[in-house]
Image (spheres, rainbow, N blue to C red):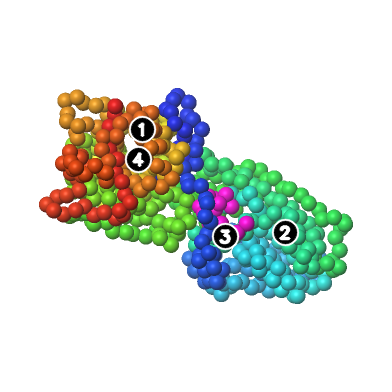
Amino acid sequence: MESSNAPNAGIGKEEAPKLQIYPTPNTGVLPFWRDKYEREAKKYWDLFYKRHQDRFFKDRHYLDKEWGRYFSGAGRKDVLEVGCGAGNTIFPLIAAYPDVFVYACDFSPRAVNLVMVFVLSAVSPEKMSLVLQNIKKVLKPTGYVLFRDYAIGDLAQERLTGKDQKISENFYVRGDGTRAFYFSNDFLTSLFKENGFDVEELGLCCKQVENRARELVMNRRWVQAVFCSSGGATSSSEEASVRVDIFNQAIIEPDVAANTLKEPMNDSEVDMSEGVAFEMFGLSSFEDNEMIEVNLRDRSFKIEVLSKEYQHTCRSTGLMLWESAHLMAAVLARNPTIVAGKKVLELGCGCGGICSMVAAGSADFVVATDGDSIALDLLAQNVTANLKPPFLAKLITKRLEWGNRDHIEAIKEENNEGFEVILGTDVLYIPEAILPLFATAKELIASSNKGLREDQQPAFILCHIFRQVDEPSMLSAATQCGFRLVDKWPSKNSSSPSESIISSWFSENGHEVYLPSPALNIMYFQVE
């Protein structure tokens, strides 16, 4: 599926503003899953550390710079870290202050085997007061709570908001089942004051990170604070000091080959640990994928896709294999004449590319495209793993955002005569993407040939389940871009099935093509 940004309709010299081609969040996390994440929180964090060990978080060397005055001075300093994880906070602290004595605890036994820094955000808002009351019981009268955690408006919150992962206000679940809350200064201040703490310091840390390769600018935001027991340690002023730290912009370039990130070339500390790389750029060295097998006639394809464990929270729709792709691949496998000897283009094929790989068996040339670079990387792996020469040489993968002039011209450089068959499976699910899709197809489809019969004319074939886009909207966009609907399946008019191009695909020697869902539709367009 098309899983990237696509511009507004119209193909001009100047690229139109981009649209976000993701569903608008509406439902949030269902009650069943919300209760499960709460009930099994300990299990999810233990699995988290089993998978990532000590690689996910970068060692926090900023503690000395930010809070060094609380650890220095005469006498032993006793430190309790709540939610110590794999020790990314306490080990740098001990290295800088050998005289401190650290008590460390964590929700996950596995994390312990391997200060309140990014821990309260993992707790349900309803239970945060209980956490603070327990901390207050063990805090010395003159002690301090050093706090750093996620702030509202952080990039990670924006990503989670777009994937229907909201549990409650500012509280979300990640793809691995762990949860995160995003704090505002007012909420945090009220929470601590209601549980017997005064605010000593309160600040907002902001960092802007740019990924030039993917043309992304990402804003990271954290709230940082110091609290003391009410009536205990005294503040240097009656009001807490409030500050906003705006750090320098860091330019980050992904190292695609190594699947890691290069360190920024400046003095600002930007956390480029494995976890942040995955969260910000979608780069993952984790084993989050699974292999599925697709059997089509005498061929078997092994396709690597995102694991089902993570699909329900995945923002990139291109990392899955959809039912429509399975159906269209089965149709092509049983009816190779649809693409035999032709040049074929697949739009929004995602990481699977199953239709393009089947087409390569009889087509003259195949170009598999998607707008998401991560899906394309996985697509290239799947193609190489499943196709052998000479078929492998007939299929290439290219990035194509619908309406992107540079991308369209790059496709034309590969084939300047146009494509006789253009395929799209489950690519119509966002209304704003309809016109860019049809406009792009019109740019790349071959010209009609009056000497050929209708079923041999260049065609744009769409297979899909109707979701947020209805048929009248699709037909209107098609007409605007110079297409006409020649056939559709299933058809309400069953009186003359022999005249239907699509119906002829669905029966061979009495054996029906595999139909993964009765809600699937196929629409067959040609140029006016």
- Tell me the element at label 1: helix
Q: Which residue is mark 2?
A: 188
Rendered residue at 64%/73% (across/down): 105
Is 510 placed above or below 448 here?
below
The disc labelled 1 sits on which kind of residue?
Ala
Is 427 placed above or below 192 here?
above
Gap between marks 3 and 1, in whole Å?
39 Å
- Tell me the element at label 3: strand
Q: Residues within 10 Å of mark 3 (few under 14, many from 20)?
A: many
Q: Are marks 3 and 1 in contact (CB under 8 Å)?
A: no
The magenta-colored residue range is 157-169
Rendered residue at 16%/54% (across/down): 511
Q: Residues within 10 Å of mark 2 (few under 14, many from 20)?
A: some
Q: Earlier in the sequence, mark 4 or mark 2?
A: 2
The disc labelled 4 sits on which kind of residue?
Leu
> Marks 3 and 1: which is nearer the front?
1
Q: Mark on residue 478?
A: 1
Gap between marks 4 and 2, in whole Å?
47 Å
- Tell me the element at label 4: strand
Q: Position of residue 42 (x, y in %)?
A: 55, 71
Gap between marks 2 and 3, in whole Å?
19 Å
> Marks 2 and 3: which is nearer the front?
3
The disc labelled 2 sits on which kind of residue?
Leu
Q: Nearer the viewer, residue 19 or 234?
A: 19
Q: Position of residue 270 (x, y in %)?
A: 61, 50
Q: Mark on residue 345?
A: none
